[in-house]
Amino acid sequence: MEPIIEVRNVIKTYKLYDKPIDRLKESLSLSNKKYHQTFNALDGLNLNIFPGEAVGFLGRNGSGKSTLLKLITGILTPTHGEIITNGRISAILELGAGFNPEYTGRENIYLNGLMLGISREEMNLKIESIIEFADIGSFIEQPVKLYSSGMFARLAFAVSINVDPDILIVDEALAVGDSRFQTKCIEKMKELKQKGVTILFVSHATEQVKRFCNKAVWIKEGKIEAVGESSEVVDIYESYMKTDSANAAPDVGQNKVAVDEQLEEIETPTVSKVSSEYMAYISKVKVNKKDVKTFDEVIVEIEYEVYESNVKDLLLGVALYTPNREYIFGPNTFLEKIDIPQTLGKHTVRYIVSQIPLLGGTYCIDIGLFNNEGLVCLHYKENAESISITNKYISEGLVYMNHRWEVVQ
């Protein structure tokens, strides 16, 4: 199979000046004196992407991810090397990019179509589905300079995914907009993926890359650090990020929690305050006791409310952290094939650890509601509850592991 995108030894170099006047001095210098330093945003990248692949790009801010995507779309040109693409590219790179602020939303739809090589006649056949997807009401007839960031995202996404692209590029677009819109976007991206559209996806939410993409590319300081199956590359990247930031972790301390054998709970705002904003909401979290010992049973009871007639693929996750936000364990109902209620109303689910293996310390419990296999976060409660584990001296470390000793001689 021939690649749909070929990146061949691509270098993108920028000139960095200490002061704006240095650019003018350099251009007028008779001795060709340099007033700049060179910076390679991309440094010798080679990459092949094949039709139908969903590729996630990972890396810190400034690593070169967005620069690469702009080169692929043709917004930028390489300093050295070449990029070969085959097919129509539709991209959401920067909020409002390609929009004329003085034009209405409707006029900008036609403008974007023209930029993609789509005639007005062809756009006439697509425009109603685009407007329906954007779902911004009468604002479609208003200048986009009046739009909120969410409206920008809705319109940009609606245009990009409804023009029959061969390649769809999405750079952090899902970070804008509410959960309902994110759900709609993910479902449409899944549909395009099933049709064989090649998708390039940038997100700082590594779980989205792991769950949506079949391939991932980690770019570090302008070079490809790792490329391969998405879950493996994400694990390598997350391991690096944890190690790299270990010295910068805040010292939160081990806050002692008072002993209370009764159920402790956290209550959240009333339904009327959240039903218009959320599809589903975590209303209460309880633990059976807050002071426990290693191997005790721990029960976390989660009450949540669904505000739609049915939230498809609803899942619930529970994550355990140290106070320094070191991730210990995070199962969810989708991975473990547990069906939870997803229809309108109030529901309760219990997460039970029959023998908790953790050793002494205070541990935080996060609760999250998601849909689309965890791609869209509907509601998340960080530090929703905590437990404190104390023991007589039985071992050292974080967790007790089953083991045995053998004396050989």
Image (cartoon, helix red, strand yellow):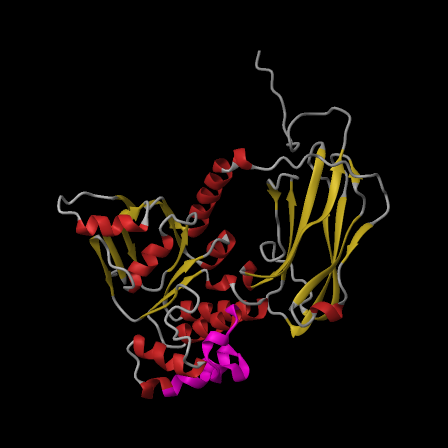
**Screen quadrant of the N terminus:** bottom left
**In the depicted structure, whether residue 343 falls above or below residue 256:** below
**Screen quadrant of the C terminus:** top right
| Magenta span contains residue 143 | yes
**In the depicted structure, whether residue 17 falls above or below residue 391:** below
Tell me if 133 is positioned left or right of 48 in this view: right
- The secondary structure making up most of the magenta span is helix
Residue at 71 percent of width and 37 percent of height: 362
**Magenta range:** 124-149
Q: Quadrant of residue 51?
A: bottom left
Tell me if 115 is positioned left or right of 101 in this view: left
Tell me if 15 is positioned left or right of 154 in this view: left
Comparing 314 with 185, the one in front is 185
Q: Residue furthest top?
A: 409
Where residue 165 appears, as percent x and y from the top left, is 35, 72
Residue at 46 percent of width and 80 percent of height: 143
Where residue 146 appears, as percent x and y from the top left, is 50, 76
Comparing 14 with 29, the one in front is 29
Q: Which residue lies furthest to the left in this view?
A: 30
